[in-house]
Amino acid sequence: MFFIASKVLWVLADPGNLLLIFLVLGTVLMWTPWRRAGRRLATLCTLALLALAIFPVGAMVVQALENRIPPPKDLPAEVGGIVVLGGMIDQFVSEARGQPSIGGAVERLTEFATLARRYPDAKLIFTGGSGNLSDQTIKESDEVKPFLESLGLDTTRVLFEGDSRNTYENAVYSKQIGEPGAEPWILVTSAFHMPRALGCFRETGWTVIPYPVDYATSGTMELRAGFNLIAGLSSLSFATHEWLGLMFYYLTGRTNTLYPAL
């Protein structure tokens, strides 16, 4: 139920979808006796889109998420294992085309392979099923193996977890198959996603070393004007999705704090 609700609510909460809905509503109202309200609503939506095109509002919020948990200054000599979260492969396109379709978060996999070579005795887990609401037949874990092999990683070392549909399930199912002991584990995911991921792992009672990758901002971004609506909407969508995820997970007991930190 949680999985279905989160997917449905996000369709309505996505900033781009909201602005389009209100813009259409304003346009329709302009052809009714409430045309003054329609003009105001359409004007507000237009101004909001213009602001997103000019100012990097979304990028600033993404940067705050990325800066929340810094990368580790030192790693231990030995670790019990390394777990990497999925979310970088389109398994449906990969299946259809016969080759991995990798998205922008490929650093999750490249750093995973690098850490695996650094710790040859560590357990390795890739966790990622299908986040698709209507199709659970093809799992991301089914399609990632060829790409990991192309990075020179011995995939016989890797435990592939394909039942998880969200970040909380990543943590729960990875702990079940990894059976972590006293030695520390390393958690690899995108920097903007690390606060929520770390909170989920802690909620399961699993203390991990956060290893954020896949940065989208410089970390010291200033509010500079430009003109790119697609980039503005995209970054705001990423940021809104993550902040809503943090709040939703905290309210439903899937993270231990609202805004996890070190």
Image (cartoon, helix red, strand yellow):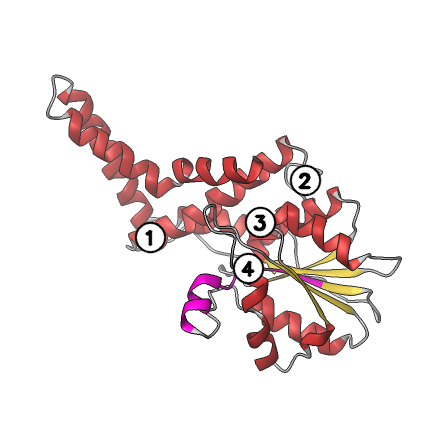
Q: Nearer the viewer, mark 4 or mark 3?
A: 4
Residue, disc 2: 255
Position above or below: 204 against 31: below
Look at 53% across and 61% down and name the residue there: 215
**Mark 4, residue position:** 139
Whether residue 94 is in magenta: the answer is yes
Q: Residue farthest to the right?
A: 182
Q: How much space separates mark 1 and mark 3, taking CA atoms? A: 38 Å
Mark nearer the N terminus (4 vs 3): 4
Tell me the SS state at disc 4: loop
Q: Amino acid at mark 1?
A: Ala
Displayed quadrant of residue 27: top left
| Between discs 4 and 2, the one toward the N terminus | 4
CA–CA distance in space, label 4 to label 2: 25 Å
Crowd around label 4: few <14 · some 14–19 · many ≥20 (10 Å): many
Residue corresponding to mark 3: 165
Residue 164 appears anywhere in the view: yes
Q: Tag 2: Cα neighbours inside 10 Å, few (<14), some, or many (≥20)?
A: many
Where residue 244 appears, as percent x and y from the top left, is 52, 38
Q: Earlier in the sequence, mark 1 or mark 4?
A: 4
N-terminal-most mark, 1 or 3: 3
Residue 42, horizontal then vertical, whole percent? 21, 32
